Amino acid sequence: MSPHPLPAFDAVTAEARGSVLYVTIHSPPINLLGPALVADLVTLIEYADTPDSYPVIVFTSADPEFFIPHVDVNRVAEYRHVASRLTGEASLGLLFRRLSTTSAVTIAQIEGRVRGAGSEFVLACDMRFAALETAIFGQIEAGFGLVPGAGAIQHLVRLMGRSRALEVMLGAEDFDAAAAELYGWINRALPASLLPEYVTALAERIARFPVPALRAIKERVNAIALADEAAFRRDSDMFAEAIGHSETQARVAAMIERGMQQRSWTERNMGQALGEL
């Protein structure tokens, strides 16, 4: 059975190669997670769960410096509203959890920076592989007086254990791909020259196997490892409450003045910038 025609997207491009769908994030200037990208993720999740869709989806970035650096802090209410189109609740965390439970096997092929909700997006994917030379990871929320609201708390504690998860989230520092691999943030760090070949081979191998088995295995793993909706909802609500606090707003404003949300030194070195704030 042939997959349905691909829907239209604004902030990503999608290309089918055999039974694998390759989705490339392309939302200039730096792939911020805003309403357009969230809308595309809603559409993609809906499409992935059609009966004859692609069994494997690989996410990449068109920008070698930025995969998804974080949310667009000027449009939080907007992207949360867009997320509700799928989940019925204005929650990025519940949307990402919905990505984790989609029928497709999802793989993030990471080059560039993934921080905040960008990290939470790749954590919602089933597997993560990153370029040793360029991938940078961070949970930066504490530096702004926020709580990670889109799944990092739930995923990182399970992946890393309590102490390392606290180091990552309380320290709000940048981690390179080698450290992220050591901590369990990602499956594997590979030289950039080998990363696409490795991910493609794995994706195509998985896509050749019987789809019912893939879906059954993923469902059973989620039953063990994926936190329930109430846990994600609680984190999301805490983020939404904190974003309006005066200290948080002041810290966001100060970082924007220093170049956040632009292709700047601050965005490239967020961990250091937050430490100096």
Image (cartoon, grey):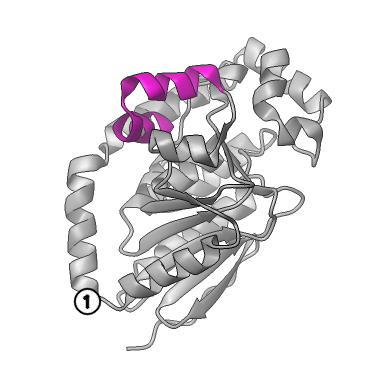
For the C terminus, the image quarter is top right
Q: Is residue 42 above or below residue 266?
A: below
Image quadrant assignment for residue 194: bottom right
Residue that mark 1 sits on = 210
Q: Is residue 253 above or below residue 8?
A: above
Amino acid of disc 1: Pro
Q: Position of residue 66 (x, y in %)?
A: 67, 47
Dot 1 crowding, Cα within 10 Å, few <14, some 14–19, many 20+: few
Q: Nearer the viewer, residue 207 or 9?
A: 207
Q: Nearer the viewer, residue 189 or 252?
A: 189
Q: Quick check: 249 left or right of 233?
A: right
What span is colored magenta in the figure?
151-172
Image quadrant assignment for residue 143: top right
Residue located farthest toward the top when viewing the structure as drawn: 247
Q: Quick check: 246 left or right of 128?
A: right
Q: Position of residue 184 (x, y in %)?
A: 38, 38
Look at the numbered disc 1 and give the secondary structure of its residue: loop
Residue at 39% x, 42% y is 94
Residue 151 shows in this picture: no
Q: Nearer the viewer, residue 179 or 69?
A: 179
Residue located farthest toward the bottom when viewing the structure as drawn: 1
Q: Position of residue 186 (x, y in %)?
A: 43, 44
Residue at 41% x, 41% y is 89
Q: Is residue 218 above or below residue 95?
A: below
For the N terminus, the image quarter is bottom left
Q: Position of residue 148 (x, y in %)?
A: 48, 27
Q: Nearer the viewer, residue 227 or 236?
A: 227
Is residue 138 found inside the magenta-colored segment of the image?
A: no
Q: Quick check: 8 left or right of 167?
A: right
